[in-house]
Image (spheres, grey):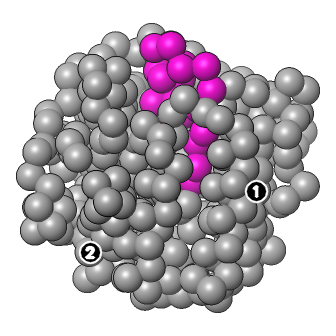
Amino acid sequence: MKLIYSEDHRGHAGAKEMRYDEMIPMMECPERMDVIMGALTQAGFTDVVAPNPHGLDVVHQVHDPAFVSFLQRCYPMWEAEFGPGRFATAYTFGMRGMDQVPNGSVHSMLSCYTFDVCVPFIAGTWRAINAAKDIALTGVDLMQAGERAVFSVCRPAGHHASQDLAGGYCYLNNAAIAAQAHLNGGARRVALLDIDYHHGNGTQRIFYQRSDVFFISLHCRPQDEYPFLMGYDTEVGEGAGKGYTLNLPMPRGTGYADWGPALQIALDRIRAYAPDVLVVSLGVDTFEADPVGGFTLKSPDYLDIGRRLAGLDLPTQFVMEGGYAIDALGLNVANVITGFTQAQRG
Ligand SMILES: [Zn+2]
């Protein structure tokens, strides 16, 4: 399987995040990609392709252009005000009863276009965001040129980002952009399966009223976990999209004995939808030792996940999302891809 990867994410580093009552270095760091790429190489996946530059046309099909422009301009505006070396983050958020239109100041933009304090803007942030988008779109190009399955090794992740809100380490929604590009390229239906520990609230919102992308998410239930206000099984889509969102929330502490059957429900529903393409939002923060997650999947479970995804026998694009247990992150990701390719051959 071809891996699409670039080093352009590396400058998106050095910010801190709030954990309870202290500021800690961001869990979402460049080393994540080092261990993932290292483990993939070790597992025999050495066909690494650099992304081709793509414009913003497809991005603007799923994101508000004003939001995208904010992502580009945020750090330079912040630096002009505060000087270099600090990261930009919001002080307030556009809550109920507050104006939702930014007034030109970088603070008002951060307030309107971010929903939490986990999306810092640093000097290298836009370059990383832009490269991750290119990695997703180059994956689509390769599939249109005949590849049956590809892995877009994106950083930063994307599934928490909606049309016009960044949050949860996510800025542009790489998987949603890929799904849209598959449709542009002739696919009639795309299944977008999100197996990250956290609910893919951004992806859900982007496609909530559409039937051409079936969004399925396995995640920790909102009673227990971020983003706390979305991801209920009662959210099924609306309008033309009714029935094309499927949430499979599970309580904190869930292991593979229960997660596996939930995956089976998802796979059965995907089969019934008969998509032309499968996009997998691949997060492995479901791992038992993940410092951000709260499920108890073990490393061999990821081999099984890969095998079962291959069982759908669909053109498949993996898009990297979360996973923070640095010691096992690489192995867990490589196990999904290994299980998938072994089952493809078998
Ligand atoms: Zn996650």
Q: What residue type is labelled 2?
A: Leu
Q: In terms of depth relative to the viewer, which is nearer, 187 or 197?
A: 187
Residue 289: image x %, image y %?
A: 43, 88
Is residue 38 placed above or below 189 in the rendered structure?
Answer: below
Q: In terms of depth relative to the viewer, which is nearer, 83 or 208?
A: 208
Q: Which of marks 1 and 2 is nearer the N terminus?
A: 1
Q: What residue type is labelled 1?
A: Asn
> Any atom of ligand 1 within 8 Å of the CB at mark 1?
no
List the residue tagged with mark 2. Answer: 331
Secondary structure category for the residue under label 2:
helix
Q: Is residue 272 left or right of residue 186?
A: right
Secondary structure category for the residue under label 1:
strand
The residue sitting at 48% across, 23% down in the picture is 182
Q: Residues within 10 Å of mark 1 (few under 14, many from 20)?
A: many
Is residue 210 placed above or below 295 in the rendered structure?
Answer: above
Q: Any magenta on residue 163?
A: no
In the rendered image, which quarter is residue 208 located in? top right
List the residue tagged with mark 1. Answer: 247
Q: How crowded is mark 2: few (under 14 residues within 10 Å), some or many (20 or more)?
A: many
Residue 7: image x %, image y %?
A: 14, 44
The residue sitting at 54% across, 29% down in the picture is 276
Is residue 198 placed above or below 260 in the rendered structure?
Answer: above
Q: Give the range drawn in magenta.
A: 174-194
Is residue 41 placed above or below 179 in the rendered structure?
Answer: below
Q: How many labels does the image show?
A: 2
Q: Is there CB contact under 8 Å for labels 1 and 2?
A: no
Confirm whether residue 94 shows in the render. no
Residue 287: image x %, image y %?
A: 46, 80
